[in-house]
Image: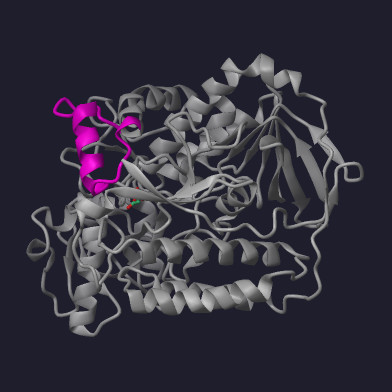
Amino acid sequence: MTELKEQTSIAERYLLNFNTEEIPFEFYDVVIIGSGIAGVYTALSAPKTSRILIITKETIEINNSVLAQGGIAVPLDQHDSPELHFKDTIYAGAGLCNETSVKVLVTEAAENIATLCLYGVDFDRDEGKRLALTREGAHSVNRIIHTGDATGREVCDTLVSAVSVLENVTIKECTYAVDLITENSETKGVLAVDVETMEPKAYYAPVVVCASGGYGRLYSSTTNPEVATGDGAALAFRAGAELMDLEFVQFHPTVLYHPENKSFLISEAVRGEGALLLNVDGQRFMPSYHEMAELAPRDVVSRAIFQEMQKTGSRHVYLDITHKDRAFLERRFPTIFKTCLSYGIDMSRDYIPVAPAQHYSMGGIKTDEWGRTKIKGFYAVGEAACNGIHGANRLASNSLLEGLVFGRRIGKQIAENLEEIKKSFGIKPKIKYYRKSSKKINDPEKLKRKLQMIMTDKVGIMRSRESLSLALNEISSMQKELEGAELTGINAMELKNMVSLANLVVKAALFREESRGAHYRSDFPVSNDEVWLKNIVFGGQS
Ligand code: SIN
């Protein structure tokens, strides 16, 4: 697979002024940014003799992994195999997957699930006490293990309990990672601020793992929590890491569409259990879009719904699972059942109004199959990373698995290099950075909302040169406004990160003059393998 490298200048290396001679500091062997499944599992996989710090912007349980409903893909069924899981992942990825990384993912899946079971994760079991397997879109067999419809919550709670008792791991909540500190292109630690006091502090470490999640909050309509503002990708880019596949943004087909809630996920597992999609005229439409009908790859289903909504002039379609009895639905989907009921929708009797919304960022910090980036000592894992396993469209329930498999691999890297890592303990870099700022940002929240509307309207499920060019103009002027602006609060720093990243997402979407996976260009509606079997990569300068 070749790459198209785009050099984009990085005007401001750090978002804050600081002098390493003056600011408070602490030393660690490893700093992990983010407390989702990828961050916590990496900490658990690293040697117990390494001093690890996990920092997280909010409290430890606020992250995207916790919200994962469906489950974790793992080839356990007698009719399944890593080869078949590989094939399905590659098919969903529409030609852009990195095959080496996908092989790692599928062959190391089962051993990591066994580890989760040892930690005590309580997955649903069948009558024979084997892990119960369900189906999701584009999987050719039943392959998804789950805990009801709250798999992310169960896995995260269990792993957080396990990591919280480790003496070698310190957890700092409400700590915002502003920038990666580097010297001579090597990792030296993380510049962070306390979210309450805004006091800066340096956490020095020769190894930093970015597990800060994706950039879903670039969109107004998303299933992601508020913390998903793409800070990890933005700070990595400023430090000289590469970002890849940013144009591939996954829209989940079935997100609740209710006046009071347009971000609650209705898991693909509901379709896995037989739910059908109907347009507002009550007609089933998926069989005319794809042979796998409701279980076609996610990008296909989202686009089909979008088209049906356009055809019928409606803002939603319906999901119908009324053929299943109430007791089954309450048991299999307790969270979804209860939440729908709280909005007056009894899914055993009523159709659920749903529409697509942003759900997952395929692009991120470019890594190899060991989580390594271009910067020595800097790793990325989970949704923050892009190791090529998702290609142009992520296969359902491969994301928690990615956090596990590659988190463990980073843990192995840390173990292998521990002696070397420890030699750097106590060595402070000499950096004095001054960023001239001459103006204030008025109402960063309002500007965030403006950006989210631009991205939703012009860089959504369907894009074109026209919509993307309009978006680029508006985002470029926001970027100019932010140049040299004082970044006094978390909101302002998030805004700065979001605008920088949005600019790259739009540029990548403009470059890719074809349709592939989650990236659909109405002006280039088909894939062009001759020209576009390549990844678009930004950055790499420090
Ligand atoms: C879902 O439950 O539909 C989400 C699973 C995923 O995003 O992989």
Pick whichever, 231 or 327, lies toward us.
231
Q: 255 left or right of 21?
A: left
Magenta part of the chain: 74-100
Pick whichever, 240 or 403, lies toward us.
240
Could you tell me which residue is drawn at 30 percent across and 42 percent down? 97
Q: Report whether residue 449 is seen.
A: no
Residue projecting furthest to the right = 22
Q: What's the image's color scheme? A: one colour
Q: Position of residue 474 (x, y in %)?
A: 52, 79
Image quadrant holding the N terminus, namely: top left
Pick whichever, 181 or 27, lies toward us.
181
Q: Position of residue 539 (x, y in %)?
A: 53, 50
How many circles with numbers are drawn on the protein? Answer: 0
Which quarter of the figure has residue 507? bottom left
Could you tell me which residue is drawn at 29 percent across and 64 percent down? 513
**Relative to 530, residue 218 above or below:** below
**Relative to 514, residue 99 above or below:** above
Q: 217 left or right of 336?
A: right
Q: Position of residue 421 (x, y in %)?
A: 68, 21
Q: Position of residue 503 (x, y in %)?
A: 51, 66
Q: Report whether residue 118 is seen.
A: yes
**Relative to 274, residue 473 above or below:** below
Pick whichever, 204 or 475, lies toward us.
475
Residue 430 is covered by the magenta coloring: no
